[in-house]
Image: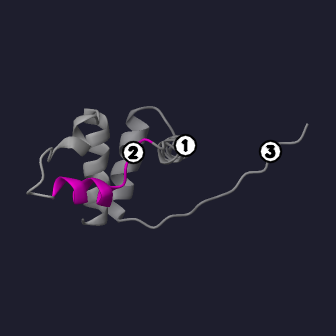
């Protein structure tokens, strides 16, 4: 039986980040490849969730100061979804 085809991905990052990542991964008894594969799969799975509205859509609704229900777009989001939204916005410098 033949092995499934594999791909290699090379990334550039800050040297300090790479060293800290390596240290933390090893302390937890994992390999960098395993952690990166898990992160990639989590990213793919989270990206497929249709229930997370875009940052621009939420902010445009929240920033309408004169309208009632100012917090309506956020009220049904879980704290985890709100945190993910904040992180995505920070990463995009919105």
Q: Tell me, yes or no, whether the highlighted magenta stretch contains residue 62.
A: yes
Badge 1 element: helix
Q: Nearer the viewer, mark 3 or mark 1?
A: 1
Q: Where is residue 79 in the image (x, y as percent from the top left)?
A: 25, 34
In the rendered image, the vertical position of residue 57 relative to residue 46, given as above or below = below
The answer to whether marks 3 and 1 mark residues whose Cβ atoms lie closer than 8 Å is no
Image point (30%, 60%), residue name: 56
Quadrant in which the C terminus is drawn? bottom left
Q: Earlier in the sequence, mark 3 or mark 2?
A: 3
In the rendered image, the vertical position of residue 90 relative to residue 84, given as above or below = below
Residue under label 1, please give it: 41
The answer to whether marks 3 and 2 mark residues whose Cβ atoms lie closer than 8 Å is no
Q: What stretch is highlighted in magenta?
A: 51-63
4 sits left or right of 67 in the view: right
Q: How is the image coloured?
A: one colour
Residue 77: image tag: none
Q: Which of marks 3 and 2 is in front?
A: 2
Image point (59%, 60%), residue name: 9
Badge 2 element: loop
Nearer to me, 55 or 28: 55
Residue 4: image tag: 3
Badge 3 element: loop
Q: Tell me, yes or no, whether the highlighted magenta stretch contains residue 59.
A: yes
Q: Position of residue 52 (x, y in %)?
A: 39, 45
- Name the residue furthest left: 66
- Name the residue furthest right: 1
Nearer to me, 19 or 88: 88
Residue under label 2, please give it: 52
Q: How far apart are marks 3 and 2 (CA)?
A: 33 Å
25 sits left or right of 38 in the view: left
Image point (33%, 50%), residue name: 20
């Amino acid at each position: 039986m033949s092995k499934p085809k594999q791909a290699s991905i090379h990334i550039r990052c800050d040297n300090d980040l790479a060293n800290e990542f390596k240290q933390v991964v090893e302390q937890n008894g994992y390999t960098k490849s395993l952690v990166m594969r898990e992160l990639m799969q989590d990213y793919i799975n989270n990206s497929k969730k249709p229930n997370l509205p875009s940052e621009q859509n939420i902010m445009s609704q929240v920033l309408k100061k004169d309208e009632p229900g100012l917090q309506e777009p956020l009220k049904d989001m879980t704290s985890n979804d709100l945190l993910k939204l904040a992180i995505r916005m920070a990463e995009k410098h919105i």
